[in-house]
Amino acid sequence: MQVASVVLSVLLALVAGFSGLGKLQKKPQIMSSMEHVGVKLNQIPVLAYLELAGALGLLAGLAFVGLGVLSSSALSLYFVGAVIAHLKVNDGPAGFAPPLVLGLLYAVNAYLIASAF
């Protein structure tokens, strides 16, 4: 596996892990953002566990390439959903740019992992 994909996988696993933990800890900023885009309270733990599973998958993907590609691709789609949620409430670029950039980074990471083999 290329050094770039290893570094990016670890960094993106940290991003997903901290994001998932923040949702489980019900951090005020995260909760207000979730409420703003219309996520129901009972859906937040599901989203958190999806992010945590993706983070673990990225780390396990350092040993099992297919799992890394799958996890990175799934997290990319997760953030596509976040972009759509922000667009539905007419958020401007400040609202949808962060998940858009993360979604693109996860897609690039999936490509890097897959192309390494």
Image (cartoon, helix red, strand yellow):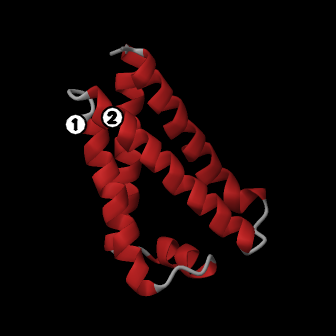
Which comes sooner in the sequence, label 2 or label 1?
1
Label 1: which secondary element: helix
Q: Quadrant of the C terminus?
A: top left
Q: Residue at x 26, y 37 (%)?
A: 59
Q: Amino acid at mark 1?
A: Ala
Q: Amino acid at mark 2?
A: Gly
The percent position of residue 40, horizontal first and vertical second, equals 49, 85
Residue placed under numbered mark 1 in the picture: 60
Label 2: which secondary element: helix
Is residue 44 visible to the viewer in this orientation of the structure?
yes
Image quadrant assignment for residue 38: bottom right
The percent position of residue 27, horizontal first and vertical second, equals 41, 73
Q: Label 2 neighbourhood size at 10 Å, few (<14), some (14-19), many (20+)?
A: many
Q: Is residue 73 left or right of residue 37?
A: left
Residue placed under numbered mark 2 in the picture: 68
Q: Quadrant of the N terminus?
A: top left
Figure check: 9 above or below 78? above
